[in-house]
């Protein structure tokens, strides 16, 4: 029977979305990492490692569609592990179709599900095959706009563990005109606040600059929102932990992702840190205009 600190992370997701980078980060965190294993072997492999290791062991397995028809057995294998008492977290990595196409073309390798069709055909088949797993993932990271260092930081935030079971958070600012982040658990809209864009003195600056930050957070509605949403997140934190969810992404949006969402993301993240929630801030669209 696995104990609470015997952690198992299953890494899966789209080909080209960064599974190898995530696996390297987990290895650096002390996980025993196995890449591209048939799903049916995962429970037996975990038992073997547990039997050989002294003390508690953290294991990460990378399972994806490279195992072809074996991949369909993954859900059953994971259910068997959970039924045995294994604490398990599923990390799902994805990216937009156009980004995946560019990455696959850059490495000059066919997609594992492409067959005789186009590269995009393989990507679409893979996305359909992974839909159920994505829906049940504990951590979803969209790597479309992340470099390897930013992805590594996201994985570190999610899986660094000092032994205490607690929630970790990512607060992500974004611009609605560029689309809502697909890996967001919660989305909040800052377009109810006055827009610094219409002030010529503030327009060139961002929510990281003092003048914009003070303008945005100085609005009475801004403080009312932060007070109320902090209470909401405190309630949700307790519920998330009770249900076994340990990572949450809060997406904070405004029109362009430069002023209001950036300032309010920083303010919200600070409140979470003050409440003891390890929090990473990501400004997805800052500098994109």
Image: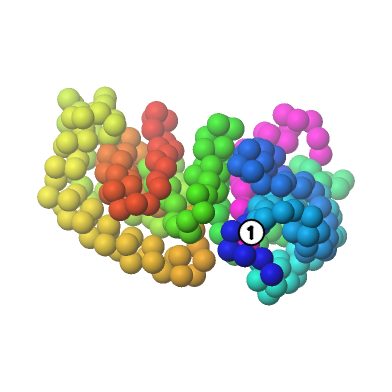
Horizontal and vertical percent position of residue 233: 33, 60
Residue visible at 74% across and 53% down in the picture: 53
Q: Residue at x 30, y 41 (%)?
A: 266
SS class, disc 1: loop
User: As drawn, is 27 to the left or to the right of 281?
Assistant: right
Quarter of the image with the C terminus is top left
Q: Is residue 287 magenta?
A: no
Local crowd size for mark 1, using a 10 Å CA cut-off: few (<14), some (14–19), many (≥20): some
Instruction: Please identify the residue farthest to the right as the structure is shown.
Output: 116
- Which residue occupies the foreground of this view, 222 or 151? 151
What residue would you read off at disc 1? 6
Q: Is residue 206 above or below residue 121?
A: above
Point out residue 169 in the picture as x, y percentages from the top left corner: 42, 51
Nearer to the camera, 239 or 199? 239
**Magenta highlight range:** 87-110
Where is residue 206 drawn, in percent x and y? 29, 30
Which color mode does the image show? rainbow
Q: Quadrant of residue 75?
A: bottom right
**Residue 176 horizontal/vertical position (percent):** 38, 46
Residue 229 appears in which quarter of the rendering? bottom left
Q: Is residue 225 visible?
A: yes
The residue drawn where x is 62% and y is 48% is 93
Residue reaching furthest bottom? 83
Whether residue 72 is visible, yes or no, is: no
Q: Is residue 162 above or below residue 103?
A: below
In this rendering, position of residue 198 left or right of residue 278: left
Q: Is residue 106 magenta?
A: yes
Pick the quarter of the image with the N terminus.
bottom right
At 81% across and 39% down in the image, what residue appears?
110
């Amino acid at each position: 029977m696995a104990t609470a600190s015997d952690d198992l992370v299953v890494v899966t997701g789209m080909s080209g979305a960064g599974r190898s980078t995530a696996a390297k980060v987990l290895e650096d965190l002390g996980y025993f990492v196995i890449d591209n294993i048939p799903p049916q072997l995962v429970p037996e492999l975990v038992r073997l490692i547990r039997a050989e290791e002294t003390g508690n062991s953290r294991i990460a397995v990378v399972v994806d569609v490279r195992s072809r028809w074996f991949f369909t057995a993954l859900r059953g294998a994971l259910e068997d592990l959970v039924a045995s008492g294994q604490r398990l977290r599923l990390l799902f990595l994805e990216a937009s179709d156009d980004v995946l196409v560019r990455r696959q073309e850059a490495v000059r390798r066919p997609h594992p599900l492409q067959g005789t069709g186009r590269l995009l055909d393989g990507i679409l088949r893979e996305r359909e095959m992974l839909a159920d797993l994505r829906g049940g993932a504990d951590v979803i990271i969209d790597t479309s706009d992340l470099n390897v260092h930013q992805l590594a930081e996201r994985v570190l935030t999610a899986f660094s563990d000092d032994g205490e079971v607690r929630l970790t958070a990512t607060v992500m600012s974004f611009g609605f005109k560029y689309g809502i982040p697909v890996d967001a658990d919660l989305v909040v809209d800052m377009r109810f606040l006055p827009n610094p864009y219409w002030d010529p003195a503030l327009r060139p600056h961002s929510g990281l600059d003092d003048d914009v930050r003070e303008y945005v957070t100085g609005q009475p509605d801004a403080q009312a929102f932060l007070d109320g949403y902090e209470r909401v997140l405190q309630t949700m934190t307790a519920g998330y932990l009770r249900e076994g969810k340990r990572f949450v992404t809060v997406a904070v949006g405004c029109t362009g992702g430069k002023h209001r969402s950036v300032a309010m993301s920083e303010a919200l993240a600070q409140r979470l840190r003050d409440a003891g929630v390890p929090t990473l801030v990501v400004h997805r669209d800052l500098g994109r205009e």
